[in-house]
Every structure is written in structure tokens, then in C-alpha cells.
Amino acid sequence: MSGAENARKALPGMMLGKRNLGLAGLVLVVAVAVLLGWIVFQRLQPQTVRATLPASSGLAQGAGGIPLAPPLELKPLRAEEAKNANDSLPFSTRPLEVASGVNLLSAAYDELSQRSSLDCMTAAIFYEAGYESDRGKRAVAQVILNRVRHPAFPDSVCAVVYQGSERRTGCQFTFTCDGSLARQPPRGPWEAARVIARAALSGMVEPTVGMATHYHADYVMPYWAPSLDKITQVGTHLFYTWKGGWGRRAAFNRVPVPEPMDGPADALAELVLPAELTPEQLGAEVTLGLSPIMADRTAGLAGPAARPVEGAAASPGADSAAGRLLADERAGRLLADEPPPPPSAP
């Protein structure tokens, strides 16, 4: 058999071999593409399912590994010692993630819910950061919104602000359980807080504090501080977020619910101030009436440890809980606040 005839007979086999080789290559390419796609898909999945808290953090975890709020205890340090301790705790080096805006004043929430959220947010900004810069006020509002979106905390603004307020040593924001609500705030700072509260609830984001869920004044040192990631300082407040996956933006994916009809919002129902004020009214002092719920919470706070607010004008009830400010040397001991600000000038 000639070479030409052999080549003719071998040609179909060679073609079949090339076809099989091409098919195998195609299968390999598809397999690699599927594998890469699966890896990318896994990386894009919300991390709430895979979120973890480092075992070294020492923080307690609830169902599903969700972190629990750490004990509200301060180290027994003087202000200067606490500042030095805070300075020695380094800031986290992980990239700062910026929160997504959430509009709680949209048509998705009824009018009562919107008003309640606005009242609770205004009170938190005023009592927690009323004498901070606008950025400091926005930072406090952002922490509240971050908590609302995180599964470790309640799912509405008022519920977050008043979490633990039924206990004098359990509230997450000190002003809700230390008698601060009995103070008479000036209209100007109150309205300034309300403007920032409305912007925050309408979707504005304060990017400098990222996904922060905790903060405290720089002149106190909570035991939990080393267990969290310290991310920034704004004014006198140091801001923290959870370590690990629970501190990542993907974990903040909960949709806030409307304010409950019988929840903490009722306690602020009578704290609402007029939205439109004249220049003369902006400088006027105003007495905030307490609803029965808030009156119950503040009753009994005025005792041996209480003193009248310095510089405050005398008014009916000034000798009662409604006209006194709890003189608490341990103010600032809780998760997110500082001692009551000094009274405004007469």
C-alpha cells in the first residue's frame, strides 16, 4: 500500500482525534468558567449568612452568632487616664465602608411613624451631641441608623434609642434613663438637632463614621473598647464597629419597620416642637411636657444625687424631677454618650 493510500485512510482518524481534542478543550473552558463564576457569586453573597465574630474578641453571641451588646461598664480611670488609654488603642486599618442611605420619612411609612422617628432621632441628637459640631451631630444620627439596619439591635429608630431605658444601668443612650429628659432645652439647639435628624431620616449619610454602631466620650474607657474596631474620632466621641463580618456593610441589610403604636415613641409624643419658628422664638426657652410613660420613667430620679440645673430660670415644678438634672459622676458610662452638656447661658 502506497504512502498516499495510507494517508487517505488515516485522515478520518486524525480528524476525529482533532474533533475530540477540541471538544475536551471546550469542556475544560466551560468548567473553568463555571468555577470562576461560582467563586465570584460566593464573594458577592450578603455576608450576614457568613458573618462571624472573631473568637479573640471575647464578646458574647446570641442565636445565629449575632453579637450581643457588651456589658455597660467603665474602667475606673480618671479623665486624663482614660484619654491616655484611648490614645493607646490604635485605629483600625481596614478600609472604611460607607453606609447606604435609608429614607424613613418616605410614603412607605405612615405619618405617625415618621413623626415618631423624627422625635426620637431629634432627642438623641440633642441630648447626646447638642453641643458638638454639625458633623458630630450627624455622626450620632448615623450610629442610630446603622443600628436600625443591623440584626444585633432593634429595628426602628425609637426602639434603638430607648433600648434598655427601663433600667437605669441598662440603657444604650444615657439620656433615656438618667433624668436628662427633665432638662429644659433651648429651642435653637433643639431645632438645629431636628434639622439634622430630618436630613438623616431622609437618606443623608455621614461617611466619616462608616458602619459604626458604638461610640463613647474620649474621657471614659469602656471595658469593651479593645473588643471592637476603633474607626474614627469626631469631636469628643470615639466611634467603633463590630470586628469581623458583623462589622461589614453587607451585614447591615435589615429593612427598618414602622414605629410601633405603643412603643417608646409614645414617650416623646409631647416633646414635639413647632416646625416653623420665628427668630424671636429660636432664642426662647421651652419646657417640654412629659407624657405619662416618660413621667413614669423619670419619677424618682430626683433625690440625694440630684441637683437643680445651674443657670436655669425658675419654673413651676423646678423642685421636682421635671426640673432637676441628675448629678451623676459616672455619666458617660454607657455605650453611646457623654455627660449632660452644660446649660445654655441665660
Image (cartoon, helix red, strand yellow):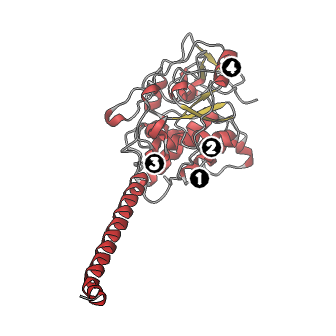
Residue 337 seen: yes
Question: Which is more foreground, mark 1 or mark 3?
Answer: 3
Percent x, y for residue 318? 61, 22
Q: Residues within 10 Å of mark 4 (few under 14, many from 20)?
A: some
Q: Which residue is mark 1?
A: 204
Q: CA distance from mark 1 to mark 4?
A: 34 Å
- Residue 166 percent coordinates (x, y): 42, 26
Instruction: Please say if the residues under marks 2 and 4 sit with CB atoms less than 8 Å apart.
Output: no
- Residue behind mark 4: 84
337 or 86, which lies in front?
Answer: 86
Q: Check whether the beta carbons of the residues at disc 3 and disc 4 lie within 8 A of each other.
A: no
Contact, CB < 8 Å: mark 3 with mark 2?
A: no
Left or right, residue 234 beside residue 103: right
- Tag 1: amino acid: Met
Decide which of tag 1 and tag 3 comes sooner along the chain.
1
Name the outermost residue toward the right: 345
Q: Secondary structure at mark 3?
A: helix
In the displayed structure, does residue 163 sit left or right of residue 23?
A: right
Q: Quadrant of residue 344?
A: top right
Q: Looking at the image, is mark 2 or mark 1 earlier in the sequence? A: 2
Q: Identify the amino acid type marked 3.
A: Ala
Question: Disc 3 designates what residue?
Answer: 250
Q: Quadrant of residue 131?
A: top right
User: Tag 2 or tag 3, which sits nearer the N-term?
Assistant: 2
Label drawn at residue 138: 2
The vertical placement of 208 against 297, above or below, is: below
Tags 2 and 1 touching, CB below 8 Å: yes
- Vertical side of 209 occupied by 276: above or below: below
Label 3 neighbour load within 10 Å: few <14, some 14-19, many 20+: some
